Amino acid sequence: MDGPATVEVVPPVEAGLPDGGLDLPAAVEAGPGDAAVTETSRSETGTEAPAPVFPSAPTSCAIAVRLKASPNADGGGSGLPATHQFTLLVDWAGNTATSGAGGTANKVTLVQSGGAWTTQGRIQLTLSISPDENSASGRPYLTYERISIRPTVDGCAGSATGNYQGSYGDMVFTIPFEAELAGVVDQAGPSLLVFPNSKTEIHPLDLYGVASNELMPSGTSARWVAGDGTLVPMSSLPAGGALGVSGFLLKDRALAFASSYRLEVLPSAIDLVGNLTDAPPALATVAGPGLFSQDGFEGPLDALLGGKVKVIDASALPVPSGTKAIRFAPIGFGVSDEWNCDDRFTARLAVGPTAKVVKVSVLPYRSSHTGPFMAQMKLAVPNGAVSDFGAYWSSSNATPLPSPWSGPLPGASQNTYGDLAQIELALPAGIGKEVIVDIRRPCFEAGLPGDGLVIDDLRVE
Protein backbone atom coordinates (compact mmCIF):
# COMPACT_ATOMS: atom_id res chain seq x y z
CA MET A 1 0.00 0.00 0.00
CA ASP A 2 3.03 2.27 0.11
CA GLY A 3 3.67 2.04 -3.63
CA PRO A 4 2.10 4.14 -6.40
CA ALA A 5 -1.66 4.62 -6.22
CA THR A 6 -3.65 2.24 -8.35
CA VAL A 7 -6.55 3.19 -10.56
CA GLU A 8 -8.94 0.61 -11.94
CA VAL A 9 -12.58 0.11 -12.89
CA VAL A 10 -14.34 -2.68 -11.00
CA PRO A 11 -17.86 -4.05 -10.45
CA PRO A 12 -19.31 -3.85 -6.94
CA VAL A 13 -18.94 -7.53 -6.13
CA GLU A 14 -15.18 -7.49 -6.93
CA ALA A 15 -14.10 -4.34 -5.17
CA GLY A 16 -11.17 -4.17 -2.83
CA LEU A 17 -10.47 -7.89 -2.40
CA PRO A 18 -7.90 -9.36 -4.82
CA ASP A 19 -8.49 -13.03 -5.53
CA GLY A 20 -4.84 -13.92 -5.19
CA GLY A 21 -4.48 -12.60 -1.69
CA LEU A 22 -2.58 -9.56 -0.57
CA ASP A 23 1.03 -8.52 -0.13
CA LEU A 24 1.08 -7.88 3.59
CA PRO A 25 3.85 -5.89 5.24
CA ALA A 26 6.69 -7.97 6.60
CA ALA A 27 5.51 -6.99 10.06
CA VAL A 28 2.59 -9.40 9.73
CA GLU A 29 4.83 -12.30 8.87
CA ALA A 30 7.54 -11.64 11.44
CA GLY A 31 5.57 -9.94 14.23
CA PRO A 32 6.49 -6.25 14.47
CA GLY A 33 8.41 -4.99 17.45
CA ASP A 34 6.73 -2.38 19.58
CA ALA A 35 8.01 1.14 19.54
CA ALA A 36 9.36 2.39 22.82
CA VAL A 37 6.19 2.50 24.90
CA THR A 38 6.33 2.12 28.68
CA GLU A 39 3.59 2.14 31.27
CA THR A 40 3.71 4.60 34.19
CA SER A 41 4.10 2.57 37.41
CA ARG A 42 5.54 2.81 40.94
CA SER A 43 8.76 0.93 41.60
CA GLU A 44 9.55 -1.05 44.73
CA THR A 45 11.38 1.99 46.10
CA GLY A 46 8.23 4.10 45.68
CA THR A 47 9.59 6.29 42.88
CA GLU A 48 7.65 6.95 39.65
CA ALA A 49 8.66 4.93 36.58
CA PRO A 50 9.15 6.83 33.32
CA ALA A 51 6.03 8.36 31.72
CA PRO A 52 4.61 6.64 28.60
CA VAL A 53 6.53 7.32 25.41
CA PHE A 54 4.49 7.47 22.22
CA PRO A 55 4.66 9.30 18.89
CA SER A 56 4.06 13.00 19.43
CA ALA A 57 2.50 13.41 15.96
CA PRO A 58 -0.41 11.45 14.44
CA THR A 59 0.48 8.44 12.28
CA SER A 60 -1.34 7.60 9.07
CA CYS A 61 -1.05 3.81 8.88
CA ALA A 62 -1.65 1.87 5.68
CA ILE A 63 -2.92 -1.28 7.33
CA ALA A 64 -3.02 -4.81 5.95
CA VAL A 65 -5.46 -7.09 7.71
CA ARG A 66 -5.68 -10.85 8.00
CA LEU A 67 -9.29 -11.87 8.62
CA LYS A 68 -10.46 -15.08 10.28
CA ALA A 69 -14.06 -16.06 10.93
CA SER A 70 -15.02 -16.15 14.58
CA PRO A 71 -15.61 -19.63 16.04
CA ASN A 72 -19.36 -18.93 16.25
CA ALA A 73 -19.70 -17.84 12.60
CA ASP A 74 -22.47 -19.59 10.68
CA GLY A 75 -21.26 -21.98 8.01
CA GLY A 76 -17.71 -21.65 9.24
CA GLY A 77 -17.54 -18.12 7.84
CA SER A 78 -17.79 -19.14 4.18
CA GLY A 79 -17.69 -15.96 2.10
CA LEU A 80 -15.41 -13.99 4.41
CA PRO A 81 -12.45 -12.50 2.51
CA ALA A 82 -9.03 -13.49 3.79
CA THR A 83 -7.57 -9.99 3.67
CA HIS A 84 -8.52 -6.32 3.78
CA GLN A 85 -6.67 -3.03 3.45
CA PHE A 86 -7.53 0.34 4.95
CA THR A 87 -5.87 3.50 6.22
CA LEU A 88 -6.14 4.57 9.86
CA LEU A 89 -5.04 8.02 11.04
CA VAL A 90 -4.09 7.57 14.70
CA ASP A 91 -3.61 10.58 16.96
CA TRP A 92 -1.71 8.93 19.82
CA ALA A 93 -1.61 12.07 21.94
CA GLY A 94 -5.17 13.14 21.18
CA ASN A 95 -6.58 9.63 21.61
CA THR A 96 -8.56 9.50 18.33
CA ALA A 97 -8.59 7.33 15.22
CA THR A 98 -10.03 8.39 11.85
CA SER A 99 -10.78 6.30 8.78
CA GLY A 100 -13.14 6.03 5.82
CA ALA A 101 -13.62 4.34 2.46
CA GLY A 102 -16.25 4.14 -0.27
CA GLY A 103 -18.40 6.97 1.08
CA THR A 104 -17.98 6.31 4.81
CA ALA A 105 -16.17 8.45 7.40
CA ASN A 106 -15.47 7.50 11.01
CA LYS A 107 -13.74 9.16 13.95
CA VAL A 108 -13.63 7.34 17.27
CA THR A 109 -11.99 7.97 20.62
CA LEU A 110 -9.20 5.77 21.93
CA VAL A 111 -8.30 4.62 25.41
CA GLN A 112 -4.59 3.98 26.04
CA SER A 113 -3.55 1.20 28.37
CA GLY A 114 -0.53 -1.06 28.53
CA GLY A 115 1.03 0.36 25.39
CA ALA A 116 -2.06 -0.17 23.24
CA TRP A 117 -4.82 2.20 22.15
CA THR A 118 -8.33 0.70 21.93
CA THR A 119 -11.23 2.16 19.93
CA GLN A 120 -14.37 3.14 21.79
CA GLY A 121 -16.70 2.98 18.79
CA ARG A 122 -17.10 1.13 15.52
CA ILE A 123 -15.28 1.92 12.27
CA GLN A 124 -17.34 0.98 9.22
CA LEU A 125 -15.78 0.72 5.77
CA THR A 126 -17.43 -0.32 2.51
CA LEU A 127 -15.69 -2.16 -0.31
CA SER A 128 -17.96 -0.53 -2.87
CA ILE A 129 -19.50 2.96 -3.00
CA SER A 130 -22.46 3.79 -0.79
CA PRO A 131 -24.44 6.88 0.19
CA ASP A 132 -25.50 5.22 3.46
CA GLU A 133 -25.15 1.97 5.37
CA ASN A 134 -28.68 0.86 4.45
CA SER A 135 -27.89 0.91 0.74
CA ALA A 136 -27.66 -2.61 -0.68
CA SER A 137 -25.37 -1.27 -3.41
CA GLY A 138 -22.79 -0.32 -0.77
CA ARG A 139 -22.20 -3.84 0.42
CA PRO A 140 -19.98 -5.59 1.31
CA TYR A 141 -19.19 -3.73 4.52
CA LEU A 142 -16.46 -4.40 7.04
CA THR A 143 -17.33 -3.08 10.48
CA TYR A 144 -14.50 -3.05 13.00
CA GLU A 145 -16.29 -3.12 16.32
CA ARG A 146 -13.07 -3.00 18.33
CA ILE A 147 -9.50 -2.23 17.27
CA SER A 148 -6.49 -2.42 19.56
CA ILE A 149 -3.52 -0.65 17.97
CA ARG A 150 0.01 0.15 19.03
CA PRO A 151 2.85 2.12 17.41
CA THR A 152 5.76 0.23 15.84
CA VAL A 153 9.06 1.34 14.39
CA ASP A 154 7.57 1.43 10.89
CA GLY A 155 3.91 2.22 11.56
CA CYS A 156 1.46 0.33 13.70
CA ALA A 157 0.17 -3.14 14.55
CA GLY A 158 -2.61 -4.72 16.54
CA SER A 159 -5.76 -6.81 16.48
CA ALA A 160 -9.47 -6.34 15.89
CA THR A 161 -12.89 -7.94 16.00
CA GLY A 162 -15.88 -7.06 13.87
CA ASN A 163 -18.44 -8.14 11.30
CA TYR A 164 -18.43 -8.61 7.55
CA GLN A 165 -21.79 -7.86 5.94
CA GLY A 166 -22.50 -8.97 2.40
CA SER A 167 -25.56 -9.41 0.22
CA TYR A 168 -26.84 -11.88 -2.32
CA GLY A 169 -29.79 -10.59 -4.32
CA ASP A 170 -32.20 -9.23 -1.72
CA MET A 171 -30.63 -11.29 1.10
CA VAL A 172 -28.08 -9.90 3.60
CA PHE A 173 -25.67 -12.05 5.59
CA THR A 174 -23.27 -11.21 8.43
CA ILE A 175 -20.04 -13.00 9.39
CA PRO A 176 -18.29 -12.14 12.69
CA PHE A 177 -14.50 -12.08 12.42
CA GLU A 178 -11.23 -11.71 14.28
CA ALA A 179 -8.27 -9.97 12.68
CA GLU A 180 -4.54 -9.29 12.87
CA LEU A 181 -3.41 -5.82 11.78
CA ALA A 182 0.00 -4.62 10.60
CA GLY A 183 0.66 -1.29 8.96
CA VAL A 184 3.36 0.98 7.62
CA VAL A 185 3.37 4.75 7.41
CA ASP A 186 1.10 5.66 4.48
CA GLN A 187 3.01 7.19 1.58
CA ALA A 188 0.51 6.58 -1.25
CA GLY A 189 -2.27 8.81 -2.43
CA PRO A 190 -5.91 7.64 -2.47
CA SER A 191 -6.85 4.85 -4.86
CA LEU A 192 -9.94 5.92 -6.81
CA LEU A 193 -12.15 3.15 -8.17
CA VAL A 194 -15.05 3.56 -10.57
CA PHE A 195 -18.32 1.71 -9.93
CA PRO A 196 -19.75 -0.31 -11.45
CA ASN A 197 -17.76 -2.38 -13.88
CA SER A 198 -16.23 -1.86 -16.58
CA LYS A 199 -12.85 -2.52 -17.96
CA THR A 200 -14.43 -1.62 -21.29
CA GLU A 201 -16.92 1.08 -22.25
CA ILE A 202 -20.04 1.65 -20.13
CA HIS A 203 -23.64 2.69 -20.71
CA PRO A 204 -24.23 6.42 -20.05
CA LEU A 205 -26.85 5.61 -17.39
CA ASP A 206 -24.85 2.91 -15.58
CA LEU A 207 -22.15 4.95 -13.86
CA TYR A 208 -22.83 4.90 -10.11
CA GLY A 209 -19.89 6.69 -8.59
CA VAL A 210 -16.25 6.69 -7.56
CA ALA A 211 -14.89 5.25 -4.31
CA SER A 212 -11.73 6.28 -2.51
CA ASN A 213 -9.92 3.74 -0.36
CA GLU A 214 -9.17 6.45 2.23
CA LEU A 215 -10.39 9.83 3.36
CA MET A 216 -9.60 13.03 1.51
CA PRO A 217 -9.94 16.45 3.15
CA SER A 218 -13.36 17.87 3.91
CA GLY A 219 -14.64 19.96 1.00
CA THR A 220 -13.05 17.79 -1.70
CA SER A 221 -15.27 17.55 -4.79
CA ALA A 222 -15.13 15.77 -8.12
CA ARG A 223 -16.56 16.00 -11.61
CA TRP A 224 -16.23 14.27 -14.94
CA VAL A 225 -14.74 16.29 -17.78
CA ALA A 226 -15.83 15.15 -21.24
CA GLY A 227 -13.53 15.27 -24.22
CA ASP A 228 -15.32 18.38 -25.48
CA GLY A 229 -14.94 20.10 -22.10
CA THR A 230 -18.48 19.45 -20.83
CA LEU A 231 -18.57 19.13 -17.04
CA VAL A 232 -20.67 16.51 -15.23
CA PRO A 233 -20.59 17.12 -11.44
CA MET A 234 -20.86 14.48 -8.73
CA SER A 235 -21.88 14.78 -5.09
CA SER A 236 -19.34 14.11 -2.35
CA LEU A 237 -19.79 11.33 0.20
CA PRO A 238 -20.56 11.18 3.02
CA ALA A 239 -23.01 14.08 2.76
CA GLY A 240 -21.68 16.98 4.76
CA GLY A 241 -18.24 15.41 4.92
CA ALA A 242 -17.09 17.10 8.14
CA LEU A 243 -14.48 14.37 8.74
CA GLY A 244 -13.48 14.08 5.11
CA VAL A 245 -14.61 12.67 1.78
CA SER A 246 -14.18 9.06 0.61
CA GLY A 247 -16.48 8.83 -2.41
CA PHE A 248 -18.45 10.62 -5.08
CA LEU A 249 -21.94 9.77 -6.33
CA LEU A 250 -23.27 10.48 -9.81
CA LYS A 251 -26.81 11.20 -8.64
CA ASP A 252 -29.62 11.97 -11.10
CA ARG A 253 -27.12 12.69 -13.87
CA ALA A 254 -26.25 10.89 -17.10
CA LEU A 255 -23.25 10.77 -19.38
CA ALA A 256 -23.49 10.85 -23.18
CA PHE A 257 -22.99 8.07 -25.69
CA ALA A 258 -19.66 7.64 -27.51
CA SER A 259 -17.78 10.01 -25.21
CA SER A 260 -14.57 9.94 -23.18
CA TYR A 261 -14.24 11.38 -19.68
CA ARG A 262 -11.53 12.03 -17.13
CA LEU A 263 -12.12 12.49 -13.42
CA GLU A 264 -11.14 15.87 -11.98
CA VAL A 265 -10.81 16.05 -8.19
CA LEU A 266 -10.85 19.52 -6.66
CA PRO A 267 -8.77 21.08 -5.23
CA SER A 268 -6.64 17.93 -5.59
CA ALA A 269 -6.77 14.18 -5.04
CA ILE A 270 -4.84 14.00 -1.77
CA ASP A 271 -5.38 12.11 1.45
CA LEU A 272 -5.53 13.57 4.96
CA VAL A 273 -1.74 13.75 5.25
CA GLY A 274 -1.09 15.17 1.78
CA ASN A 275 -0.24 12.11 -0.32
CA LEU A 276 -1.27 12.79 -3.92
CA THR A 277 -2.94 10.38 -6.35
CA ASP A 278 -0.82 10.05 -9.46
CA ALA A 279 -3.53 9.53 -12.07
CA PRO A 280 -7.28 9.87 -11.42
CA PRO A 281 -9.37 7.45 -13.52
CA ALA A 282 -10.78 7.94 -16.98
CA LEU A 283 -13.58 6.13 -18.81
CA ALA A 284 -15.45 5.94 -22.08
CA THR A 285 -19.10 5.26 -22.91
CA VAL A 286 -20.47 2.86 -25.48
CA ALA A 287 -21.30 4.01 -28.95
CA GLY A 288 -25.01 4.68 -28.98
CA PRO A 289 -27.60 3.98 -31.61
CA GLY A 290 -28.67 6.55 -34.14
CA LEU A 291 -31.75 8.65 -33.49
CA PHE A 292 -34.84 6.52 -33.04
CA SER A 293 -37.40 6.71 -35.85
CA GLN A 294 -40.62 7.69 -34.07
CA ASP A 295 -42.68 5.52 -36.40
CA GLY A 296 -44.15 3.00 -33.99
CA PHE A 297 -41.36 0.44 -34.55
CA GLU A 298 -42.48 -0.13 -38.12
CA GLY A 299 -39.11 0.49 -39.78
CA PRO A 300 -35.59 -0.66 -38.93
CA LEU A 301 -35.02 -0.39 -35.19
CA ASP A 302 -32.30 2.10 -34.20
CA ALA A 303 -32.01 1.29 -30.49
CA LEU A 304 -30.07 -0.88 -28.06
CA LEU A 305 -31.80 -4.14 -27.09
CA GLY A 306 -30.39 -6.14 -24.18
CA GLY A 307 -31.21 -9.58 -22.79
CA LYS A 308 -34.33 -11.16 -24.31
CA VAL A 309 -36.18 -7.98 -25.33
CA LYS A 310 -37.20 -8.28 -28.96
CA VAL A 311 -39.29 -6.88 -31.77
CA ILE A 312 -42.52 -8.80 -32.32
CA ASP A 313 -45.10 -8.66 -35.07
CA ALA A 314 -48.89 -8.80 -34.90
CA SER A 315 -48.96 -12.57 -35.42
CA ALA A 316 -47.25 -13.24 -32.06
CA LEU A 317 -48.84 -10.68 -29.70
CA PRO A 318 -51.39 -7.88 -30.06
CA VAL A 319 -49.72 -4.76 -31.51
CA PRO A 320 -51.42 -1.48 -30.52
CA SER A 321 -50.89 0.13 -33.94
CA GLY A 322 -49.29 -0.97 -37.18
CA THR A 323 -47.69 -4.38 -37.38
CA LYS A 324 -44.66 -4.22 -35.06
CA ALA A 325 -43.80 -3.42 -31.44
CA ILE A 326 -41.27 -4.54 -28.82
CA ARG A 327 -41.94 -6.73 -25.84
CA PHE A 328 -40.55 -7.48 -22.40
CA ALA A 329 -41.68 -11.02 -21.56
CA PRO A 330 -43.42 -11.95 -18.28
CA ILE A 331 -40.95 -12.99 -15.57
CA GLY A 332 -41.11 -15.87 -13.12
CA PHE A 333 -38.99 -16.96 -10.19
CA GLY A 334 -36.17 -18.11 -12.46
CA VAL A 335 -34.51 -16.87 -15.62
CA SER A 336 -35.99 -18.42 -18.76
CA ASP A 337 -35.44 -18.43 -22.49
CA GLU A 338 -37.87 -15.51 -22.72
CA TRP A 339 -36.38 -13.09 -20.19
CA ASN A 340 -33.38 -12.39 -17.99
CA CYS A 341 -32.16 -9.64 -15.71
CA ASP A 342 -30.24 -7.99 -18.55
CA ASP A 343 -33.48 -7.13 -20.37
CA ARG A 344 -33.11 -3.56 -21.59
CA PHE A 345 -34.25 -1.08 -24.23
CA THR A 346 -32.41 2.20 -24.81
CA ALA A 347 -33.13 4.73 -27.54
CA ARG A 348 -32.19 8.30 -28.44
CA LEU A 349 -35.16 10.45 -29.47
CA ALA A 350 -34.98 13.84 -31.12
CA VAL A 351 -36.76 16.59 -29.18
CA GLY A 352 -38.52 19.46 -30.96
CA PRO A 353 -38.50 23.04 -29.63
CA THR A 354 -42.03 22.84 -28.19
CA ALA A 355 -41.93 19.23 -26.93
CA LYS A 356 -42.82 18.58 -23.29
CA VAL A 357 -43.47 14.83 -22.85
CA VAL A 358 -42.54 11.34 -23.95
CA LYS A 359 -45.57 9.25 -24.90
CA VAL A 360 -45.79 5.48 -25.23
CA SER A 361 -48.56 2.89 -25.61
CA VAL A 362 -48.37 -0.17 -23.34
CA LEU A 363 -50.23 -3.47 -23.12
CA PRO A 364 -49.54 -5.75 -20.11
CA TYR A 365 -49.84 -9.50 -20.57
CA ARG A 366 -49.20 -12.64 -18.58
CA SER A 367 -49.01 -16.41 -19.01
CA SER A 368 -49.89 -17.20 -15.37
CA HIS A 369 -50.75 -15.34 -12.19
CA THR A 370 -48.06 -12.67 -11.71
CA GLY A 371 -47.65 -9.14 -10.39
CA PRO A 372 -47.43 -5.85 -12.28
CA PHE A 373 -44.74 -5.21 -14.86
CA MET A 374 -41.43 -4.24 -13.20
CA ALA A 375 -38.62 -2.42 -14.97
CA GLN A 376 -36.95 0.90 -14.28
CA MET A 377 -37.88 3.72 -16.66
CA LYS A 378 -35.51 6.68 -16.98
CA LEU A 379 -35.42 9.70 -19.25
CA ALA A 380 -32.09 11.47 -19.48
CA VAL A 381 -30.41 14.49 -21.00
CA PRO A 382 -26.97 13.57 -22.37
CA ASN A 383 -24.45 14.97 -19.85
CA GLY A 384 -27.43 16.28 -17.89
CA ALA A 385 -30.38 15.49 -15.67
CA VAL A 386 -32.06 12.10 -15.25
CA SER A 387 -35.74 11.60 -14.41
CA ASP A 388 -36.33 8.24 -12.75
CA PHE A 389 -39.95 7.05 -12.95
CA GLY A 390 -39.33 3.89 -10.93
CA ALA A 391 -40.15 0.25 -11.55
CA TYR A 392 -43.95 0.60 -11.82
CA TRP A 393 -44.13 3.49 -14.27
CA SER A 394 -46.44 1.60 -16.65
CA SER A 395 -49.21 1.15 -14.07
CA SER A 396 -49.39 4.77 -12.89
CA ASN A 397 -50.58 7.90 -14.70
CA ALA A 398 -51.99 5.67 -17.43
CA THR A 399 -54.72 6.90 -19.75
CA PRO A 400 -56.93 4.06 -21.11
CA LEU A 401 -57.01 3.70 -24.88
CA PRO A 402 -59.84 2.12 -26.89
CA SER A 403 -59.11 -1.40 -28.02
CA PRO A 404 -58.15 -1.54 -31.71
CA TRP A 405 -58.76 -5.30 -31.88
CA SER A 406 -61.75 -7.49 -32.59
CA GLY A 407 -62.03 -11.23 -32.39
CA PRO A 408 -59.52 -13.56 -30.75
CA LEU A 409 -56.20 -11.89 -29.96
CA PRO A 410 -52.92 -13.45 -31.15
CA GLY A 411 -51.31 -15.51 -28.42
CA ALA A 412 -54.58 -15.71 -26.46
CA SER A 413 -54.20 -19.45 -26.00
CA GLN A 414 -51.05 -18.86 -23.91
CA ASN A 415 -51.63 -15.38 -22.50
CA THR A 416 -54.18 -13.11 -20.91
CA TYR A 417 -54.08 -9.38 -21.59
CA GLY A 418 -54.59 -6.27 -19.50
CA ASP A 419 -55.91 -2.90 -20.69
CA LEU A 420 -54.23 -0.92 -23.43
CA ALA A 421 -53.07 2.46 -22.10
CA GLN A 422 -51.00 5.49 -22.99
CA ILE A 423 -48.31 6.80 -20.65
CA GLU A 424 -47.08 10.40 -20.62
CA LEU A 425 -43.75 11.20 -18.95
CA ALA A 426 -42.42 14.75 -18.55
CA LEU A 427 -39.09 15.51 -20.19
CA PRO A 428 -36.19 16.09 -17.79
CA ALA A 429 -35.05 19.57 -16.80
CA GLY A 430 -32.54 21.17 -19.12
CA ILE A 431 -33.68 19.20 -22.15
CA GLY A 432 -32.02 20.11 -25.42
CA LYS A 433 -32.38 18.47 -28.80
CA GLU A 434 -32.27 14.87 -27.56
CA VAL A 435 -33.61 12.62 -24.80
CA ILE A 436 -32.38 9.14 -23.86
CA VAL A 437 -35.18 6.68 -23.07
CA ASP A 438 -34.06 3.70 -20.99
CA ILE A 439 -36.17 0.75 -19.73
CA ARG A 440 -34.23 -1.81 -17.73
CA ARG A 441 -34.67 -4.86 -15.51
CA PRO A 442 -31.65 -4.57 -13.19
CA CYS A 443 -30.01 -7.75 -11.92
CA PHE A 444 -29.90 -6.56 -8.32
CA GLU A 445 -33.69 -6.33 -8.03
CA ALA A 446 -35.52 -9.17 -6.34
CA GLY A 447 -36.77 -11.65 -8.96
CA LEU A 448 -40.51 -11.53 -8.21
CA PRO A 449 -42.96 -12.68 -10.88
CA GLY A 450 -44.26 -9.87 -13.04
CA ASP A 451 -46.26 -9.14 -16.17
CA GLY A 452 -44.76 -8.74 -19.59
CA LEU A 453 -45.31 -5.56 -21.59
CA VAL A 454 -45.91 -4.80 -25.26
CA ILE A 455 -44.54 -1.32 -26.01
CA ASP A 456 -45.52 0.69 -29.06
CA ASP A 457 -45.81 4.23 -30.44
CA LEU A 458 -42.84 5.66 -28.54
CA ARG A 459 -42.53 9.36 -29.38
CA VAL A 460 -41.81 12.87 -28.10
CA GLU A 461 -44.53 15.54 -28.29
Image (tube, rainbow, N blue to C red):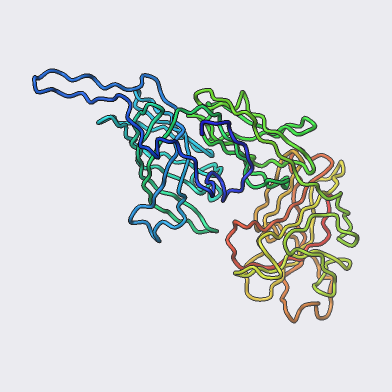
Q: Position of residue 119 (x, y in %)?
A: 34, 35
Above or below for 99 versus 309: above
Q: Position of residue 407 (x, y in %)?
A: 83, 80
Q: To which quarter of the image does residue 237 belong?
A: top right
Using residue 64 as the reference point, say whether residue 309 is left or right of it. right
Residue positioned most to the left? 45
Q: Position of residue 364 (x, y in %)?
A: 72, 67
**Depth check: 383 or 356 in front?**
383
Q: How many marks?
A: 0
Q: Position of residue 363 (x, y in %)?
A: 75, 67
Using residue 11 as the reference point, say whether residue 312 is left or right of it. right
Q: To which quarter of the image does residue 419 belong?
A: bottom right
Write the residue at 79% across / 58% down: 360
Write the residue at 77% across / 53% down: 346
Residue positioned most to the front? 30
Using residue 414 as the reference point, say whether residue 164 is left or right of it. left
**Depth check: 427 or 15 in front?**
15
Above or below for 77 versus 48: below
Write the residue at 43% across / 29% down: 89
Q: To which quarter of the image does residue 57 belong?
A: top left
